[in-house]
């Protein structure tokens, strides 16, 4: 019992060697992925994750192959066989194996691999608030596709890590887009601001939950509009959202204190409302 994998429907040990030399995911980063959190042995927000997976697959013209029910069943099998109740499931689909040539192969059999590992909420950091830095957004122009080709994101995250920060927040031109693996929100005069959904950010599932469920529940207006760093500098509060990040207050941005340097009241309410939402869907958090 513990971390395990699943390849095209078959449970495997994570040490098993399964990647073929000419898998296009391995050679080109030609594939897409999703990460779903498991709380209390149940997947959280699985439907929107799988819907986004189909969006990513369509974006790269990789055949869908697996239905929602099949993918949901694979999640259940990983949860059951691993015995893990607080975990994250990683799911990846590549265009499959073909002799190396940039253009798509004539016939493709997409390859699905999945794994499950323990995961937990970083409640200490959520309580204290985290630190982030700004970095230039060097990614491609289809950030709406959750591609496994994450070089821009990796370089950003590493820059953050080297600066002792939890996250690196990317800036394209003058516009603040999103974190290397999270969406970016700020609070100004009781209003939430975040980058609009387009090709420059990933439409985060947690972001959508904040906008469509939690903010209305708390009576918070949301503006989905571009803003620059100087606007973010004047924010009362800043937080990140993501499946594993959940809702993470930022208290230090590029060395400058955010608000009074502690997680603000709006962010703390959102954290509590998120925990409740998880408990409603999964039985407990
Ligand atoms: N943006 C990027 C670049 C990400 O990698 C992630 C993490 N998946 C997010 C945003 C947050 O998305 P979600 O809430 O769906 O996890």
Image (tube, rainbow, N blue to C red):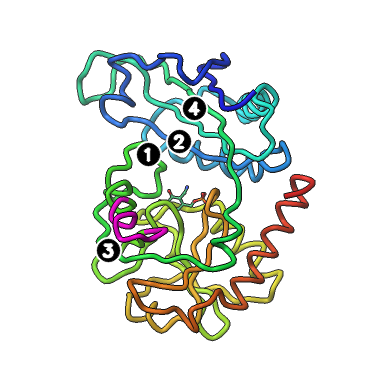
Please tell me whether mark 3 sits on a helix, a strand or a loop: strand
What residue would you read off at disc 4? 64
Q: CA distance from mark 2 to mark 3?
A: 24 Å
User: Is disc 2 placed on a helix, strand or loop?
Assistant: strand
Q: Is residue 211 above or below residue 82?
A: below
Q: Nearer the N terminus, badge 3 or badge 4?
A: 4
Find numbered disc 4 in the image and state the secondary structure of the residue it sits on: loop
Instruction: Point out the tag, 2 or 3, that comes first from the N-terminus.
Output: 2
Q: Residue 180, position in %: x, y?
A: 37, 53
Q: For the residues marked 3 and 4, what is the alpha-carbon distance in whole angstroms?
A: 32 Å
Query: Callout 2: few (<14), some (14-19), or many (20+) C-alpha neighbours within 10 Å?
Result: many
Callout 2 touching callout 3 (CB < 8 Å): no
Element at label 1: loop
- Between 84 and 156, the residue placed more toward the observer is 84
- The residue that label 2 is drawn on is 33
Residue wearing tag 3? 172
**Foreground tag (3 vs 4):** 3
Kindly identify which numbered label has been placed on residue 114. Answer: none
For disc 4, the neighbor class at 10 Å (few under 14, some 14 to 19, many from 20) is some
Question: For the residues carrying marks 1 and 4, which lies nearer the camera in this image?
Answer: 1
The verdict on label 1 being within 8 Å of ligand 1 is: no
Say which residue appears at 63% left-offset and 29% top-offset.
Answer: 75
Q: Which residues are magenta?
A: 158-167
- Return the disc, 3 or 1, that comes first in the chain's sequence: 1
Q: Is residue 272 left or right of residue 251?
A: right
């Amino acid at each position: 019992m513990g971390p395990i994998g699943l390849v095209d429907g078959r449970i495997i040990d994570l040490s098993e060697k399964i990647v073929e030399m000419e898998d296009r995911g391995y050679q080109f980063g030609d594939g897409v992925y999703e990460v779903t959190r498991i709380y209390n042995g149940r997947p959280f927000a699985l439907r929107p994750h799988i819907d986004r997976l189909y969006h990513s697959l369509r974006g790269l013209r990789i055949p869908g192959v697996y239905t929602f029910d099949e993918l949901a069943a694979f999640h259940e099998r990983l949860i059951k066989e691993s015995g893990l109740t607080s975990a994250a499931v990683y799911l990846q689909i590549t265009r499959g194996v073909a002799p190396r040539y940039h253009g798509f192969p004539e016939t493709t059999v997409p390859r699905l691999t999945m794994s499950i590992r323990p995961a937990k909420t970083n409640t200490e950091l959520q309580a204290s608030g985290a630190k982030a830095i700004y970095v230039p957004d060097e990614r491609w122009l289809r950030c709406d596709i959750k591609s496994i080709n994450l070089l821009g994101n990796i370089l950003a995250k590493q820059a953050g890590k080297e600066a002792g920060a939890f996250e690196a927040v990317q800036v394209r031109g003058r516009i603040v887009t999103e974190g290397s693996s999270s969406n970016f929100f700020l609070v100004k005069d009781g209003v939430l601001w975040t980058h609009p959904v387009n090709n420059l950010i990933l439409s985060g599932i947690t972001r959508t939950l904040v906008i469509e469920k939690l903010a209305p529940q708390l009576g918070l207006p949301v503006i989905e509009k571009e803003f620059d760093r100087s606007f973010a500098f004047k924010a009362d509060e800043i937080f990140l959202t993501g499946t594993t990040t959940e809702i993470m207050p930022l208290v230090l941005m590029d060395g400058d204190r955010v608000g009074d340097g502690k997680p603000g009241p709006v962010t703390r309410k959102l954290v509590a409302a998120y925990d409740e939402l998880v408990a409603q869907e999964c039985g407990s958090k």
